[in-house]
Image: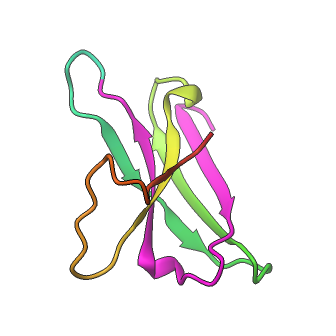
Amino acid sequence: MEGGYEFKIFIGLNGIHPEQVAVELFAEGMNGAEPEILKMKTETSQNVESYVFHTIVKTKRKAADYTARIKPCYEGISAPLEDNRILWQR
């Protein structure tokens, strides 16, 4: 994609409904700016075992600057960045 990237990841949620998690694309801030956090959207998947999440990023940054993360997301939860339930892409 010219001028950016389309990120698409496949995630097995082991029975958790995709609305109970937030899948985000994260990039450290540049030159003292706040980090970029982009919510990824769920696509319909033919595979019952996994879900497809995607987003489009228009940027001049390198694709390697972005990392996907999954964190709990449901009413009444507060999840700090250090929460051990947040899974980071490796």
Does residue 46 appear to the left or right of 34 in the view shown? right
Across the whole image, how many numbered discs are drawn on residues? 0
Q: Residue at point 75% right, 78% down? A: 49
Percent across and percent down for residue 48 are 76, 83
Does residue 11 appear to the left or right of 42 in the view shown? right
Q: Residue at point 68% right, 69% down? A: 12
Of residue 61 and residue 19, the one placed in the foreground of this image is: 19
Question: Is residue 20 shown above or below 1?
Answer: below
Q: Residue at point 46% right, 24% down? A: 60
Q: Looking at the rendering, in which quadrant would you find the N terminus?
A: top right
Question: Is residue 78 shown above or below 29?
Answer: below
Percent across and percent down for residue 42 are 55, 71
Percent across and percent down for residue 78 are 22, 66
Percent across and percent down for residue 71 are 42, 61
Does residue 37 appear to the left or right of 51 in the view shown? left
Q: Residue at point 58% right, 45% down? A: 89
Of residue 80 and residue 26, the one placed in the foreground of this image is: 80
Q: Is residue 23 magenta?
A: yes
Residue stretch in magenta: 1-29
Of residue 49 and residue 37, the one placed in the foreground of this image is: 49
